[in-house]
Image: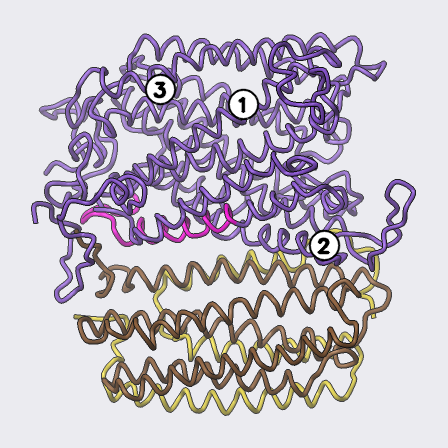
Chain colours: A purple, B yellow, C brown
Amino acid sequence: MSQTTGTVAAPGAHVPHDAHHEELGFLRKYVFSTDHKVIGIQYAVTGLLFLFFGFSLMMLMRYQLAYPGSAFPLLGKLLGESRMPGGIMLPDFYNELGAMHGTIMVFLGVVPLAVGGFGNFVVPLQIGAPDMAFPRLNMASYQCFFLGGVTMLVSFLVPGGAAQSGWTSYAPLSVIASQGQTFWLIGMIFLITSSLLGAVNFITTIIQLRAKGLTFMRFPFFVWAQFVTSFLLLLAFPPLEAAGIMQLMDRVAGTSFFLPSGLVVSGQALSNAGGGNPLLWQHLFWFLAHPEVYVLILPAMGIVAEIIANNTRKPLWGYKPMVYSLGFLGFMSFIVWAHHMFMTGMGTAMAAFFQTTTMIISIPSVVILTALILSLWGGSIRYNTPMLFALGFLPMFGIGGLTGLPLGLNVSDIPLHDTYYVIAHFHYVVAPGTIFGLFAGIYYWYPKATGRKMNETLGKIHFWGSLICMNVIFFPMFKLGLAGVSRRLFDGGASYAFAQPVLHLNVISSWGAWIMAIFQLAFIWNFFWSIRNGEKCGDNPWEATTIEWAAPSPPPHGNFIAAPQAYRGPYEYSVPGAAKGFQPQFEA
Amino acid sequence: MTTEHAADHAADIDKHVKQYIAVFVALMALTIITVAISRLHLPVAEAVTIALIVAVIKGSLVALVFMHLISEQKLIYAVLALTVAFFVVLLFVPSLTHFDGFWVH
Amino acid sequence: MEIPYTVEVRRDTGLTNGKIGIWLFLASEVMLFGALFASYILIRTGMPVWPRGDSILNVPLATINTIVLISSSVTMVMAWASLKRNQFGRFRLYLGSTVLLGGVFLVIKYFEYSHKFENGLFPRTSNFLALYFTLTGLHMLHVIGGMTVNAYLWGPGAKLWKTNPEWFANRVENSGLFWHFVDLVWIFLFPTLYLL
């Protein structure tokens, strides 16, 4: 065999048939592949498509928010009389778009791209492994994700439309909602299964398949980020799966897990047994959904860390505190969830508990962000596209994180809860935060995956346009929220007297969104054009130090010509007295 | 070729088998005990406490002996410790958040 | 291309990939059933009245089922021990018994459920029953899952014994871990639902 594998050949071990070098057919190579690189690209492309779809839903919503009650030009009539009669959006359809925008962006867009895409493609390469520990399980994970995505998309077509009770699916509204909600629940069960299987795979792979000499404290920060993220997925998702099963029981079997007694809907008392608790849903949902937001940010932090080290030509400042912060953050993320529930009437003791843990959890985030910023000091900064996005991430995440503080304190949360302030806060962290990190990662690892670089000019246009537009979209929302405009209002607050002075901000945000779409075209064009026409490059175009750059670009099946070994830490740049400006981890 | 137990030679297996039988007997006995105690119709707080104690003993026997946890590697212990911590949080914190009196009979 | 540590352990962790994988999966299952137990606690403590388990459910049948599952756990671990002693015939007997005992569990549950339905007792009837059916239903799905894997290892999967006995023994051990976990969940479910 031309490729050897990991560090220990297993005598007597059975070699699976699909590992022999017979030529696999198209389906086995590109559709039903067990190769982590193929699966990673499948996740990434599917995730990007869903991101674009979720963004499109929002662009439609933004027209209603900017010009409530106006007919959407051209496309409006296409969506039919039940959703947009005369091109004017119905409130129910607005709710559908809102619930599915959130669901799709979080569960079908960001996580599959960040964890499924980047995690799958990069982690085995960065630890010097031939593949994931369980390649067939990896394929099954992607297929579950795919089925979940299909279920979610199909739900738009059922009578009554897709889920429309928010991405949070609060009971009792979600329990009495139309059929689309059942599809949402089934879709979530597929997606959760996919994540659980993936988490098992990542953790096992990172622990067991790392190269000789690659101790835990020599891991690239990206690997640590994916490691902690996988634990979050593993332990936080199951309660939501249980909750989903219970909500399905409520909807389909007539149980009352989440339905209180005496509930009256449209003048008619429900015939269910009652005795349930809507707050039970909230607890189980947020038990997942809070760790989930760290699932959203951690991979991006990992990507940004890699790119900053590489483009400052310096080691990361404070690698150890950053790693300990990651672990602490992961742990704390499980005990802060009820800060999403301050307004549910909890007692002062528990409110104080959650407030305290929430304040404490901001500390590791600050440590990581500060370390990344301090890593820039004294660096020889190269301003290529990945670095621009990584640099842009820093202040954006800073704004997102800082604006979270008043939300985490019980009392200041009272006027801010469920307003546009919240929307601004979390979008800052996820949109110019995580998504910028993901863009950075695409521009950075594209050469490894394809053997070609993406175009720098288009990349810079993409960056500057996106940076400006993101702020145009989301910054006004802080003002909107402080003025008291609630989220999930189909008219953006137009029917409220107190909202009148700030309504014009809706128009600004909407135009920001539509213009940002145009800048994404630069990225989309670049992504596809560069596959054939990008500047060809070798194994290590960025002169980086981590192990993935030892593999050919693109890597073959089995990844490395010879099993790599780690000889030093991950960021040995500008070592005093060294012959080269950088010492790769994998060179003796 | 090593496996995780130094004890995978025949003699050690014999010792393990003896343990399995002993645990089986203990589990049967504890099952009978827990059912018998339930017939006493104790007040809720006591009934729950005793039933839980018996269940934890039974569960521990299964986990430590049948699942070989008593001789497992540190890594597995670490994962389980983390899991148990979050399990306890999940079990009690939601109820505590809306605790406005006594446990209901 | 071979994935290392599928059969032999990695020296610094002392574990095979499969062993870590199954324990990680079981950790997630602890959280799954934990959420349901948490729901039980929240719902029950929120109700002014809650029926005693034995006033609605069939304790003798469930006690038999508890004994059945515990026995199946013993046969399961004996199946693995037999492989370690190179006794393939005994392995077949023990693993077969495990699957059969699982079948007995399912049959008894079938009788329990149908008796409830015949008497107009459905999940929607009360929260007690909703929790009962959901908890035991999900547990039952896990029993079926475990039986399926065990049946595969008893049948077509057993071919691996001839070509790679260690790998096969590891697979049986890992499947056993899942099966013991299913038994463990029942050890807590039984008193919670039936006796309290």
Query: How far separated are the C-alphas under marks 3 and 1?
Result: 32 Å
Q: Which amino acid does label 1 sit on?
A: Phe
User: Is residue A204 covered in magenta?
Assistant: yes
In primary-sequence order, the first of circles 1 and 2 is 1
Compared across the picture, whether A101 is left or right of B15 comes to: right
Is disc 1 in contact with disc 2, using a CB cutoff of under 8 Å? no
Please name whichever residue, B103 or A526, is drawn nearer the observer in this view of the structure: A526
Question: Which element is circle 3 on?
Answer: loop
In primary-sequence order, the first of circles 3 and 1 is 1
Give the quadrant of residue A97. top right
Residue B46 makes an appearance in the image: no
Is disc 3 in contact with disc 1, using a CB cutoff of under 8 Å? no
Query: How far separated are the C-alphas under marks 1 and 2?
Result: 32 Å
Q: In which quarter of the image is the C terminus of chain A?
A: top left
Residues tagged by mark 3 and mark 2 found on one chain of the structure: yes
Residue A111 makes an appearance in the image: yes
How crowded is the residue under tag 2: few (<14 C-alpha within 10 Å), some, or many (20+)?
A: many
Label 3 marks which chain's residue?
A
Question: Which element is circle 1 on?
Answer: helix
Label 1 marks which chain's residue?
A
Q: What residue type is labelled 2?
A: Asp
User: Is residue A19 covered in magenta?
Assistant: no
- The residue under the point 49% across, 18% down is A395
**Residue A376: assigned label:** 3
Q: Where does label 1 land, which residue?
A: A55
- The residue under the point 75% across, 58% down is A255
Residue B22: x percent and y percent?
45, 91
Compared across the picture, whether A151 is left or right of A178 comes to: left
Q: Give the range drawn in magenta.
A: A190-218
Q: What residue type is labelled 3?
A: Leu
Q: Where does label 2 land, which residue?
A: A250
Residues tagged by mark 1 and mark 2 found on one chain of the structure: yes
